[in-house]
Amino acid sequence: MLHTLDRLADLAGRYDVLLCDIWGVIHNGREAFPEPSAALTKWRQTVGPVVLISNAARPSQEVALHLDALGVPRDAYSALVTSGDVTRPLLVERAPGPAYRIGPVGHPLFEGDGLVFSALDKAKFIACSGPDDDEVETPEDYREVLTRASALHLPMICGNPDKIVQRGDRLVYCGGALAELYEALGGTVIMAGKPHAPIYREALARAAELKNGPVDPARVLAIGDGIATDVAGANAQGLDVLFIAAGIHGAETREAAGGLDPVAAQRMLAASGAHAAYAMDALA
């Protein structure tokens, strides 16, 4: 049963810890949403830790600076864990490679991990942060090289499992879309971000540090807009979920005039084999 909410504060007596997605919930890549930041700040001040959990391939320190630039107050969160944080050890343990890079030159995921990059036929694996230019490229731009990589049996380490994110009023492709194509071509993909377990282990460990004691999963609420990542990942960890409709699934889960369509949201969740305890149009 999907329960609709007006305010996050309505759950203050039910949960102690929040694991909250960033992109699509707190900002859209170009501007921050004031109400989510205010709701998270109030929760942190009156209830308990707020751990932001992001599929960004960048280290958490860089994502924090991006949040600063967008105007998200640091009071809105207690800690920040990214897919980049939990993917970097996978790259370090395979250094120096060599690796075939997919992603912008100088991407911070690849800095300081000791990797050497090479042509595809010399590589031992693929290191992927996302498209080289996500403003214009699609997965189809990589079909030829990924077909050759699959024939070479190169595993892909993908730093961002998201397939798409909202940037302003547009949707752009992420590393997860390339990983999906690679798997369809017979390739092997290794990921540590949502919906995979490593990022949740790290986020819950950070929450335990903040609470100075163990965290009861039954008292943890995960918040997110991505069904395949945020919702599915929390489901796999046995965590309750607050689904945010005004994100990447807005076209399917919101009414034409705006606002949550709970029937459509429930239908889409069920069709994906996922479930959420609660839903809101936007976090407030």
Image: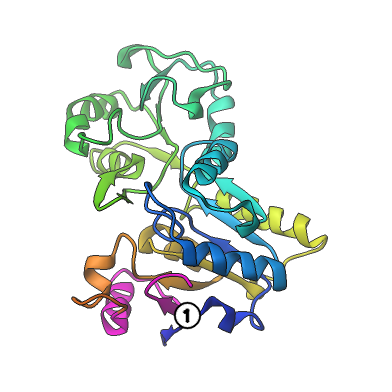
| Total marks in image | 1
Which stretch is magenta?
A: 261-284
Question: Residue 102 placed where, x, y %?
Answer: 34, 26
Does 85 appear above or below 52?
Answer: above
Please name whichever residue, 246 or 162, is drawn nearer the observer in this view of the structure.
246
Label 1: element kind: loop
Q: What's the coloring here?
A: rainbow
Report the quarter where the N terminus lies: bottom left
Tell whether 119 sits left or right of 87: left
Evaluate whether residue 47 shows in this view. Answer: no
Per the image, the residue denoted by label 1 is 277
**Residue 267 lies in the magenta stretch:** yes
Question: Residue 169 placed where, x, y %?
Answer: 25, 53
Within-10-Å neighbours for mark 1: few <14, some 14–19, many 20+: some
Q: Mark 1 is on which residue type?
A: Ala
Question: Residue 77 placed where, x, y %?
Answer: 62, 57
Please name whichever residue, 151 or 41, is drawn nearer the observer in this view of the structure.
41
Question: Residue 216 placed where, x, y %?
Answer: 70, 71
Does 178 appear above or below 107?
Answer: below
Q: Quadrant of residue 51?
A: bottom right
Q: Quadrant of residue 82?
A: top right
**Residue 276 lies in the magenta stretch:** yes
- Residue for point 25% across, 41% down: 181
- Residue for point 78% across, 64% down: 214
- Residue for point 55% across, 66% down: 38
Evaluate whether residue 191 shows in this view. Answer: yes
Does 170 appear above or below 96?
Answer: below
